[in-house]
Image (cartoon, coloured by chain):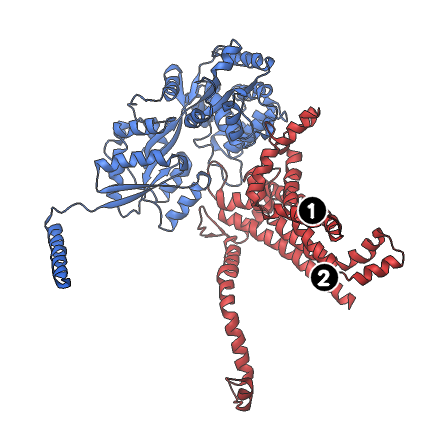
Amino acid sequence: MSQANLSKNQKPGLLNTENQRTLTWVLFLLPALLVYLVFMAGPLFDSLRLSLYTGKGYNPTEFIGFQNYIDLFTVPLWREKFFNAVTNTCIFFAIHMIVQNSLGLLFANLLSSDFKGRNFFRTLIFTPTTLSVLVVGFLWTLILNPNWGAVNQVLVGIGLEQWALPWLGRENLALPIIALTSVWQWIGMPTVMFLAGLTGISEELLEAASIDGASEWEIFWKIKFPLIQPVLGIIAILTFVDNFNAFDVIYAMAGAKGEPAYSTDLLATLFYRTGIAGEHPTGIPNMGMGATIATITFIILMSGVLLWLYLSRRNADETK
Amino acid sequence: MQKKLFVVLSILILASLVLTACGTPAPKDVTLTLGSWRTDDVAAWEAITTAFHAKYPNITVKFDPTNPPDYNATLRSQLETGTGPDLFFVRSFGVGRELFDAGYIASLKDLPGINDTFSAGARAPWATDSGEPYAVPIAAVSHGIFYNKDLFAANGIEVPTSWEDLMAASQKLLDAGVTPFANGTKDAWDINEVVMMQLLPSDVGGYDGRMAYLNGDRCFNDPEIVAAFQQMADLKPYLPAGFEATSYADAEQLFAQGKAAMFFDGSWSIGQIKKDATAFQWGVFYPPALKGKDTYVSFHVDAAIGANAASKNLDAAKTFLAWLETPEFAALIGNNLPGFFPMTNEIPSLTDPIANDFMNFNKQAKGVDIRFVWEKLMDAPTDKVNAYTSLNNNVISVLKGEKTPEEAANAFNADVADWYGPASKCK
């Protein structure tokens, strides 16, 4: 039935065109909404609810209000574990933000210019991104192994024995090294996104600038960089969300306990140990406390994203 | 033609129906699932369950293991949702006890023969305080030091008879450019379970000594515990150069490749080392006690099998549990899983020579005991540090040179006394 036909026979009430149109929209949205409610929103709210309960195993039944939250911040053991994880997660995030994204920007800038073998390097930089995190973690654990790892063999080979350290066994080294491994793997992501941003800049602008006598350095900071700021914002928020949820690379390289001595324990590994696996060797999970840690992680992520939305909205308004 | 075929077929089908109905009423076939954390032992358990099926043709047992770190949580969720296996491996002491107290494990106080087949000590990890059993003990593990006989011979070293001898031998190996021990601390659990807790029974005087700590008669920072931490400090120079980042698997490889002369480990590794260490002769000895002390062996209760109280086939499950008491099963587990030892009073002779060596430790030692922290000391409330974690952290601190043995013992004592009632006066 065509639109024209409908508008001629406009009826008052439920089935007039306006309502029918809304109904159509709702019908189209309904399946997705249902899936979202059942598989995303439902579990999320159930997890929030769970954080108000306590008990052993997977079905905590005893309602205790906000006691889990109070315990997490006041009981010394929990507080220590939690703030250790928060600090480590922040360091992990900072290393990604600084190293991964600056290098990504540098690579993108280099790869956007024309030179021989450009496509080869573009592929090369993106390749690790396609590997499984567990594979990357395992590979780097082997490379860094103190007994037969390539890194230490090279160091010993060139006479730097004192530099051949047990990299993943030192509390001050393990976290930065694992973060750098993760940077090595994911560097392709910001590179590709920055590259897309840079390629989107109009040639005319760059040409005009160089005719006016601007150096490459000036062109980058005065023209390219301001123009790719929206991309920078998106990359920053993606890095933030990914790192505050990071689990797999730590699990692969340092185990669920964040060895050595909890120095690589992130929010997600702490959550996994508390809420799902339990501590070795008893292995009894505390689902309520796990849900509490998950909820706080959610709040941290949520505030980060909202802040970003607010800032980018304000930026957009200013440019208007 | 087609009609004829139809008639013949119909007659055959009818005949088969009638004949089956007329046969002796066979007992109903049941299939039981057996939950376990031993994912490595599928083949061995198939041999065991096949032997059981040969004896009880109407009962089939299906071995269905879960990844070890997930086992406790998975089993609990299965039991809570009513999808638990009919039979399952039960952890010793607190962890298993909790499932029994929650009503998920069937009581075995009426299981015939359980009190005669196993000693009270073997039953205790899976029984209530009043002695009501809820799981049949099936396997214990032992511990020892695997050693490279070729490297020992090349450096003129005999199997040491005291801790001091062992340290002297280690120094000799180190001087000869050989890494004495393969163990590291990256995975943390191994340094705790197969090194520290292997030495502790000799340091504290076996079962009686451990009981003195559990009863509150001795504090966890007394000279014996300090001595154990001192042994860790003694070991430090003899571990691999990068021991902080050497994992349990790395350590096994270091030993198997002949790069380290000795490896503190458990009897469960016999199969793995046999497979990997093929280039040299090797054997096993128990770490000797400090001079003037008796050697006690860390012979640790490992697994028992219990029945799901909600199982639809509880009778069949109990038939299986009763079979676990037979010498037939004891021989099957000892020989199919070298390094796991039956816990029955009568132990059949084992075919694996290394497994027999481990059994001989028990005969030669003053006594045997389980791992130091397993009983009661791991049942800390969730906001306190249990003895396992505290011991582990302090052992690693000593090895890394962050704490002296005295400081480590004091920290260990403080952690345990913080929640363990009988030790409260040790604060």
Q: Alpha-carbon neighbours of circle 1 within 10 Å: few (<14), some, or many (≥20)?
A: many
What's the mark number on residue A100? 1
Above or below — where is A200 with respect to B379?
below
Which element type, helix, strand or loop, lies under badge 2? helix
Host chain of mark 1: A
Amino acid type, callout 1: Gln
Host chain of mark 2: A
Q: What residue sits right under mark 2 in the picture? A: A312
Residue B30 left/right relative to B337: left
What's the mark number on residue B277? none
Using the rendered view, name the quadrant where residue B246 is placed: top right
Residue A1 left/right relative to B30: right
Quadrant, the C terminus of chain B? top right
Which element type, helix, strand or loop, lies under badge 1? helix
Q: Alpha-carbon neighbours of circle 2 within 10 Å: few (<14), some, or many (≥20)?
A: some
Residue A270 in the image: state x and y as whole percent.
56, 43
Instruction: Tell me the shade of chain B.
Output: blue
Asked whether residue B417 appears in the rendered view, the answer is no
In front: B248, or A271? B248
Instruction: Tell me the shade of chain A.
Output: red
Above or below — where is B262 with respect to B99?
above
Quadrant, the N terminus of chain B? bottom left
Q: Residue furthest right?
A: A213
Q: Residue furthest top?
A: B156
Do badges 1 and 2 share one subunit? Answer: yes
